[in-house]
Image: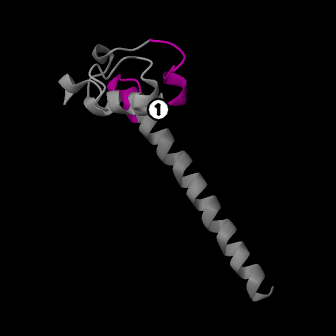
Amino acid sequence: MNKKDKIWATIIIIIAFFYIFNAVVDYKVDKIYEEVGVSNPNSMTDSDCSSNKYNCGDFSTYTQAKAMFDKCGGVSNDIHYLDGDDDGIPCESLR
């Protein structure tokens, strides 16, 4: 195996490591949310950006509301009207 092949093999191993690591972390985060009985706002299965489905009362923390706000498009597509005054900060009462 020449030097160029070794470099490519190393790059592929690093990419595979990060892919597996990310999958494990996502799984553990989902399990933590499940254990405390809260929906993971970052989970693709728990978010719906097609219609006005959520309001600030659906979130227990600002971080959850912000994650949903950002996932659905932020200021440019505030489908859930989480940012009432259009300042880019959703659910300010949760801060």
- Image point 65% across, 67% down: which residue? 13
* Residue 77 seen in render: yes
Quadrant where the image shows the N terminus: bottom right
Disc 1 residue type (three-letter): Lys
Q: Is residue 21 above or below residue 78?
A: below
Residue 56's spot in the image, x, y percent?
29, 17
- Image point 42% across, 23% down: which residue? 78
Chief secondary structure of the magenta span? loop
Q: Judge by depth and name the residue closer to the eye, 73 or 25.
A: 73
Mark 1, residue position? 71
* Residue 41 seen in render: no
Q: Is residue 80 above or below residue 21?
A: above
10 vs 43, left or right, is right
Q: Judge by depth and name the residue closer to the eye, 56 or 22.
A: 56
Region rendered in magenta: 32-52
Residue 12's spot in the image, x, y percent?
69, 66
- Image point 66% across, 70% down: which residue? 11
Quadrant where the image shows the C terminus: top left
